[in-house]
Image (cartoon, helix red, strand yellow):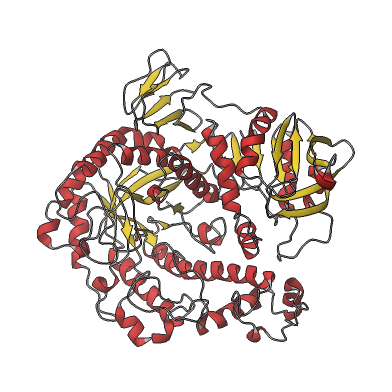
């Protein structure tokens, strides 16, 4: 499916030939007797796909070069006979013990200088030649073996790169970092010294081979340019590691799709890493948010942020029971909750769902990570709920393919450089993702179709676009943002936007630098608000007062820029705090203050009204989520009741039919607690 992969965009649908539905399956964990009924049971649950083998390295290659595929051949064939295809994983997240015995130095080393060891997973260094060689060998052996297997449809690379352990300061990583830098700076050490500003604290390097990986507090703070390039190096090397696998897989069978699961640190999911793949897999564990009231919002945000990287995705792992590892254990999803999490995932862009996991394992570090089946292999309500979803998705799933999620209010949440640069010096303020989530939560709670979108992405249909505190803004995005505004959009910029460049250096121009003309302001003074209640800075906008948090700025408006809010306190009293510059049919607002929870509670209604954005259903009952997916000829309304009460909905398209429950009557529908409706309007 992969010859022409369209560029990443939040509106990019997947070109799968089916809606994937199934589970993660680990036949190597069970004896034949326990596995006996698995294929029948999966088929009865409506499964069409399983994922296997991503942790089966030692089963597949018990000794170097000696491969055994019988168990997987037999399992894949048996599942195939039941109409279930297989996605395989390259098993490099947990290689066999013989690899570390032969190459004890091939492990990663953490920032404290401690080498990782065999005994859990992800302990290897992706910079070490022996590990790369191992990765290519096992991938090639598996790819060649399964190339003509009609039931193998695609591959997952590794498993959740950079989850848990993402840095590496091993000797192999040190020299690999130097290779990366040499490439990045085209062998010009002066260019590197300038980019990092190494004149500060006598850090000037004469040769690339003298440059160490940066470690925090050894003893002081590393150079921010050095740190940002180290993050780029980690992305570069994981991309290289993955590409070596992808090339082997594509050569063996170009019909296979290839993806990776997970969105973890130090990977640019809009860059070459994702462009080598057909699509992204996002593993979703909503119960990590232990608060049932905030969970629908955090779940929605996480899915929207995943979609912002490259478009629709699959969920190779969706939580199907409580999860537990030594330090925590989640609540068991109540009846209906798993189904609800499934439809929320689909609503926000999933074109495939595999539950994690088929059966709960009785041993190992995750012996309490519950699957659809309990330890005793007796089918109970979690499997029954999956069966019900499987029945519903049989017709609905294929109809959803080709549709994208409708977004009216968007927040910038996903850019590698912006996120990595801010993380090098947060000054104790929330991370950029936290700011994005705070804004997203408020608008999502208000019933608006809220999403996450990158500033260079397609902004069609968006009425309000917010960029919360992105210090690194690429000047190339500015004309695109201007066009969005001129066409009628409202853009909200905020304190510190555009203040650093791609080298993580502070810009020489007055902030907001490349955004200054668009915003119609210059920032003439700024301060961190460490204790907002102490000497408060209060801004007033149309009679609403807000005590600023995190950051404050004093703005100097350009001619023609309106002042919407002024400071009313301290030495800033009477000076501009929030401005509006009009361009074409739209406006750019610049808020010289932190976009905190209180900010959006105070000013969110004014911002929403100024932008003129509306929810698709005006009187959405509290706790009900609405998301729409559409294509040129059809539109789906996902209505999800997250509350503990029945919810009466009105104003729905009267002719729409509900794929998974009763149809609306004269535009009204009642949803029981945890129930979901998926209405189809066709044609739109
Ligand atoms: C995921 C991981 C799985 C399993 C699961 C439950 O992050 O990919 O292998 O560990 O979490 O902890």
Q: Is residue 131 left or right of residue 536?
A: left
- The residue under the point 49% across, 38% down is 404
Q: Is residue 102 visible?
A: yes
Nearest the eye: 464 or 147: 464
Q: For the view shown, which residue lies furthest in the left direction?
A: 33
Instruction: Tell me the quarter of the picture where residue 586 sits.
Output: top right
Task: Say which of 436 and 234 sits in front.
Answer: 436
Name the residue at 38% across, 59% down: 156
| Residue 348 at x, y percent in the picture | 46, 40
Furthest-front residue in view? 534
Using residue 482 as the reference point, say whether residue 178 is left or right of it. left
Total numbered badges shown on the rendered structure: 0
- Residue 587 in the image: x percent, y percent? 75, 35
Seen from this angle, which residue lies furthest right? 559
Q: In this view, does 208 lie above or below 165?
A: below
Answer with the quarter of the image where residue 28 lies: bottom left
Residue 103 lies left or right of residue 560; in this view the side is left
* Residue 521 appearing in the image: no
Work out whether 201 lies above or below 376.
below
- In the rendered image, the vertical position of residue 403 relative to residue 656, given as above or below: below
Farthest-out residue, top: 666
Location of residue 116 with respect to 635 vertically, above or below: below
- Ligand 1 image position (quadrant): bottom left
State left or right for residue 629 relative to residue 415. Answer: left
Report the front residue among 326 and 256: 326
Whole-percent x, y for residue 521 in the image: 83, 45
Residue 356 image point, x, y percent? 31, 53
Residue at the location (59% across, 26% down)? Answer: 614
Name the image quarter holding residue 647. Answer: top left
């Amino acid at each position: 499916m992969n010859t022409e992969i369209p560029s990443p965009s939040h509106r990019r649908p997947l070109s799968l030939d089916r809606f994937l539905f199934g589970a993660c399956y680990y036949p190597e964990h069970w004896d034949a007797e326990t596995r006996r009924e698995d294929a029948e049971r999966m088929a009865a649950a409506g499964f069409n796909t399983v994922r296997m083998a991503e942790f089966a390295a030692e089963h597949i290659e018990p000794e170097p070069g000696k491969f055994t595929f019988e168990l997987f051949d037999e399992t894949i064939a048996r599942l195939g006979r039941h109409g279930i295809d297989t996605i395989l994983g390259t098993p490099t997240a947990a290689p066999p013990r013989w690899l570390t015995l032969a190459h004890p130095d091939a492990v990663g080393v953490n920032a404290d200088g401690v080498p990782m060891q065999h005994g859990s997973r992800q302990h290897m260094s992706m910079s070490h030649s022996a590990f790369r060689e191992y990765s290519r060998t096992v991938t090639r052996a598996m790819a060649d073996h399964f190339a003509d297997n009609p039931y193998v449809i695609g591959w997952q690379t590794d498993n959740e790169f950079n989850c848990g352990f993402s840095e590496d300061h091993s000797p192999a990583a040190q020299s690999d970092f130097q290779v990366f830098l040499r490439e990045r700076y085209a062998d010009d050490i002066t260019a590197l010294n300038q980019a990092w500003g190494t004149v500060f604290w006598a850090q000037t390097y004469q040769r690339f081979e003298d440059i160490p990986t940066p470690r925090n507090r050894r003893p002081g703070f590393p150079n921010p340019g050095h740190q940002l390039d180290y993050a780029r190096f980690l992305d570069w090397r994981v991309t290289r590691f993955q590409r070596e696998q992808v090339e082997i897989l594509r050569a063996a069978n170009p019909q296979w799709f290839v993806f990776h699961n997970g969105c973890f640190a130090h990977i640019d999911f809009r860059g070459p890493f994702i462009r080598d793949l057909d699509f992204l897999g996002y593993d979703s564990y909503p119960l990590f948010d232990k608060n049932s009231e905030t969970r629908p919002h955090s779940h929605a945000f996480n899915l929207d942020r995943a979609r912002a990287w490259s478009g629709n995705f699959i969920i190779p792992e969706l939580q199907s029971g409580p999860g537990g590892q030594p330090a925590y254990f989640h609540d068991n999803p109540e009846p209906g909750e798993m189904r609800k999490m499934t439809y929320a995932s689909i609503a926000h862009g999933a074109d495939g769902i595999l539950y994690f996991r088929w059966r709960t394992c009785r041993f190992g570090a995750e012996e309490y990570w519950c699957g659809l089946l309990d330890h005793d292999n007796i089918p109970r309500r979690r499997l029954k709920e999956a069966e019900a979803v499987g029945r519903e998705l049989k017709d609905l799933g294929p109809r959803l393919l080709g549709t994208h999620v409708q977004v009216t209010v968007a927040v910038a949440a996903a850019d590698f450089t912006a996120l990595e640069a801010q993380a090098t010096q947060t000054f104790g303020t929330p991370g950029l993702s936290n700011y994005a989530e705070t804004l997203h939560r408020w608008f999502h709670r208000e019933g608006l179709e809220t999403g996450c979108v990158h500033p260079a992405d397609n902004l069609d249909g968006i009425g309000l676009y917010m960029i919360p505190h992105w210090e690194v803004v690429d000047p190339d995005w500015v004309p695109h943002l201007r066009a969005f505004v001129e066409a009628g959009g409202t853009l909200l910029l905020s304190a510190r936007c555009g203040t650093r460049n791609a080298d993580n250096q502070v810009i020489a121009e007055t902030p907001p630098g490349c955004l200054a003309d668009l915003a119609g302001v210059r920032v003439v003074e700024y301060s961190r608000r460490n204790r907002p209640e102490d000497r408060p800075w209060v801004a007033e906008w149309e009679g609403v007062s807000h005590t600023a948090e995190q950051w404050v700025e004093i703005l100097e408006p350009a001619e023609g820029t309106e002042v919407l809010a002024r400071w009313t306190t301290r030495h800033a009293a009477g000076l501009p705090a929030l401005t509006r510059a009009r361009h074409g049919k739209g406006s750019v607002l610049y808020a010289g203050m932190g976009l905190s929870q209180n900010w959006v509670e105070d000013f969110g209604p004014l911002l929403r009204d100024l932008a003129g954005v509306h929810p698709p259903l005006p009187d959405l009952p509290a706790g009900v989520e609405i998301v729409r997916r559409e294509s040129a000829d059809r539109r789906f309304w996902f209505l999800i009741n997250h509350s503990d009460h029945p919810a009466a909905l009105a104003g729905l398209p009267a002719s729409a039919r509900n794929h998974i429950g009763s149809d609306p009557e004269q535009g009204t529908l009642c949803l029981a607690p945890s129930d979901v409706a998926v209405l189809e309007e066709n044609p739109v």
